[in-house]
Image: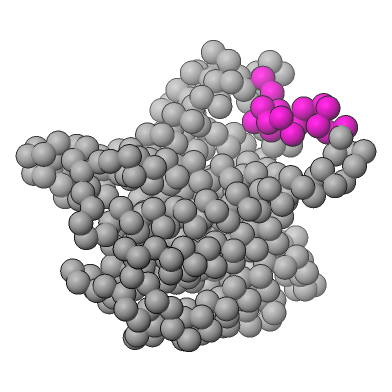
């Protein structure tokens, strides 16, 4: 589970200082930790826009490379011949890292009082924590499905197909949040669906080694991950809108703890015998650690985008990552990936649909629908592109 709440940070920064009783003694927020957020950098950005544009370009390139590298490394770590590790344990380790990062930031912001805040908000107010247990389960299953998809699909195909999360999130936005979406965006989602169907058509990646792999299982896994991504994102938004007074890092800790408890239970249930025989970290290599680290910290890059850029940057980053994944897969002999005309056409349509959907122009219906929703929390339209794995 990419950290789903990290991208929401930018929307909560203006109010986080007033969301706790001792906010007046809080330390600087995460943005203050960044060299680009100190006074000198702020003055430089105000004096010269080229520096801000340069930073946005750097964020765009970094996010695109991170997206591509994450799927490529995940795919390579799951290929036949690589040491076999348990994906369930990898998900649990990723949750531990995200929990540690969230708590460390909270301690930096509020000092020793952070311990009391965690106790009150997570354990004393356990009903509030229980609210996020459902999306936590969805994110946990989603991450495990992505590992399954990476075991049966090449990186480029998996990453392209995973963009269907835009369609599922839009569907749940309309059905659960009763929010309108413009005709332009529905058209872009139709183009996206058609492009993914081309990418997933038989024989698209001619020459790909399908031994011990199943395209049906891989496609079903990535499709299930897309559905869970859309449902969990919209469900989480409903919770945040109703309980917007909870600081974002506390909410992240609540999510992480629920995922960790459920994840440990699933590890014991599904892989308990294997762990007893060969250990929790069986099959782990430096590549496995690299994959887990990317899954844990990838959401931080999306937070950078939300802080310093916009959805257009996210859309372009997604498009660039698809191109990079395809090119790198093509040039790595062990991937044995040879894109066909259908794959190239489908990927082009997916890129076009992503850029079209991410454009900032909104219709009056969309704006009226957004105004009719509560102002707390974050917009699902901003979250449609955020899920990172």
> What x and y, as percent, mark residue 90?
30, 44
Image quarter for residue 352? bottom right
Residue at 58% x, 45% y is: 301
Image quarter for residue 264? top left
Residue at 51% x, 46% y is: 298
Q: Is residue 24 above or below residue 149?
A: above
| 233 and 374: which is toward the camera | 233
Residue 30 within the magenta-colored segment of the rendering: yes
Report whether residue 370 is seen.
yes
**Region rendered in magenta:** 27-43
User: Would residue 316 appear left or right of 130 to someone viewing this image?
Assistant: right
Residue at 23% x, 53% y is: 82
Q: Is residue 237 above or below residue 41?
A: below
| 325 and 161: which is toward the camera | 325
> What x and y, as percent, mark residue 257?
38, 36
Residue at 42% x, 57% y is: 71
Q: Residue furthest right?
A: 47
Report whether residue 258 is seen.
no
> What x and y, as percent, mark residue 153?
33, 69
User: What secondary structure predominates along the stretch shown in magenta?
Assistant: helix
Quadrant housing the C terminus: bottom left
């Amino acid at each position: 589970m990419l950290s789903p709440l990290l991208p929401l940070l930018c929307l909560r920064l203006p109010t986080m200082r007033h969301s706790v009783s001792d906010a007046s003694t809080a330390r600087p927020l995460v943005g203050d930790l960044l060299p680009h957020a100190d006074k000198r950098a702020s003055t430089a950005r105000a004096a010269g826009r080229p520096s801000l544009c340069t930073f946005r370009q750097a964020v765009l390139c970094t996010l695109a490379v991170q997206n591509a590298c994450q799927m490529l490394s995940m795919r390579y770590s799951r290929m036949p011949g690589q040491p076999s590790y348990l994906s369930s344990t990898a998900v649990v380790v990723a949750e531990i890292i995200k929990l540690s990062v969230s708590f460390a930031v909270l301690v930096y912001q509020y000092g020793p009082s952070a311990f009391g805040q965690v106790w009150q908000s997570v354990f004393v107010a356990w009903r509030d924590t229980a609210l996020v247990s459902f999306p936590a389960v969805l994110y946990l299953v989603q991450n495990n499905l992505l590992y399954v998809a990476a075991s049966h699909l090449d990186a480029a195909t998996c990453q392209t197909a995973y963009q269907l999360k835009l369609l599922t999130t839009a569907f749940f936005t309309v059905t659960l949040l009763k929010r309108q979406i413009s005709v332009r965006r529905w058209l872009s989602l139709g183009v996206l669906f058609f492009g993914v169907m081309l990418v997933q058509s038989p024989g698209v990646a001619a020459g790909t080694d399908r031994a011990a792999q199943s395209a049906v299982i891989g496609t079903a896994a990535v499709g299930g991950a897309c559905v869970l991504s859309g449902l969990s994102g919209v469900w989480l938004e409903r919770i945040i809108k109703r309980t917007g007074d909870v600081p974002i890092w506390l909410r992240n800790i609540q999510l992480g703890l629920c995922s960790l408890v459920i994840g440990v239970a699933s590890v014991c249930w599904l892989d308990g015998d294997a762990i007893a025989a060969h250990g929790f970290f069986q099959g782990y290599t430096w590549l496995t650690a690299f994959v887990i680290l990317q899954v844990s910290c990838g959401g931080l890059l999306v937070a950078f985008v939300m802080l310093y850029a916009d959805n257009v940057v996210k859309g372009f980053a997604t498009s660039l990552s698809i191109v990079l994944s395809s090119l790198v897969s093509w040039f790595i002999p062990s991937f044995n990936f040879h894109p066909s005309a259908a794959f190239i056409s489908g990927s082009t349509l997916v890129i076009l649909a992503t850029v079209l959907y991410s454009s900032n122009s909104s219709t009056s219906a969309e704006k009226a629908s957004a105004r009719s929703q509560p102002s707390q929390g974050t917009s699902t339209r901003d979250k449609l592109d955020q899920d990172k794995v």
